[in-house]
Amino acid sequence: MGNKRVMLPASEVDLTAVKYIPENIQAPHLTGFWFKFFLNLAEVPGIGSLIMNRLKNDNKFDEKLKYTVIPECPMFKPEFPPQEPEPAVVNIEEDAKPEDRVELALKCLPEYDPASNWSGDKTASFRYWKIRDYAYAYRSKFTTPLMARHFYGCLVFVSVF
């Protein structure tokens, strides 16, 4: 397998002419108990690396990578083609001041009515508290972060036992 295989740049590939050709892979066909056993064996630190190296060598995995030339730079961050702006979507500039970004983000949130959440009714049904609920409770001095943490810790303790 000493010949180098040079791939085309992605911009030059005609996707209509590309046909997938599956290669013959030499690997065990495992299901059920034997599959679970193989996975447990493959996760054992010393034995697992030997098994994976054997499978890679049998299928010439390293050679395929070594003798393939990819004529493009690696992409460290996904790049997408520019798109038309969607209706009712607010784009927040990454370089804008944080205060402006928060203000724009707050305008996107639905109106907050704290009275509906803080009725004081002890028999009210369970509800998931959101960040806005906690922020309102802290500002209104209904609770403190320490009290909220203590209450949450009790809930976790009760749910574990």
Image: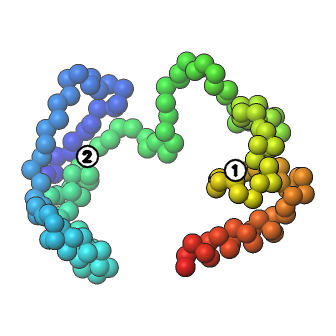
- Vertical arrangement, residue 82 with respect to residue 118, above or below: above
Q: Is residue 95 left or right of residue 70?
A: right
How many numbered badges does the structure rendering display?
2
Q: Quadrant of residue 94?
A: top right
Can you see residue 51?
no
Q: Is residue 112 left or right of residue 67?
A: right
Q: What amino acid is labelled 2 in the image?
A: Thr
At x 73%, y 69%, the residue is 151
Do the residues bearing badges 2 and 1 touch, measured as CB atoms within 8 Å?
no
Q: Nearer the viewer, residue 124 or 37?
A: 124
Q: What amino acid is labelled 1 in the image?
A: Lys
- Residue 120 position, x and y percent, is 81, 54
Dot 2 or dot 1, earlier in sequence: 2
- Residue 85 position, x and y percent, is 59, 20
Quadrant containing the C terminus in the rendered view: bottom right
- Residue 24 position, x and y percent, is 9, 50
Q: List the residue tagged with mark 2.
A: 68
At x 21%, y 51%, the residue is 64
| Colour scheme of the picture | rainbow
Q: List the residue tagged with mark 1.
A: 130
Q: Is residue 73 left or right of residue 8?
A: right
At x 75%, y 72%, the residue is 150
Q: Nearer the viewer, residue 119 or 48?
A: 119
Q: CA distance from mark 2 to mark 1?
A: 52 Å
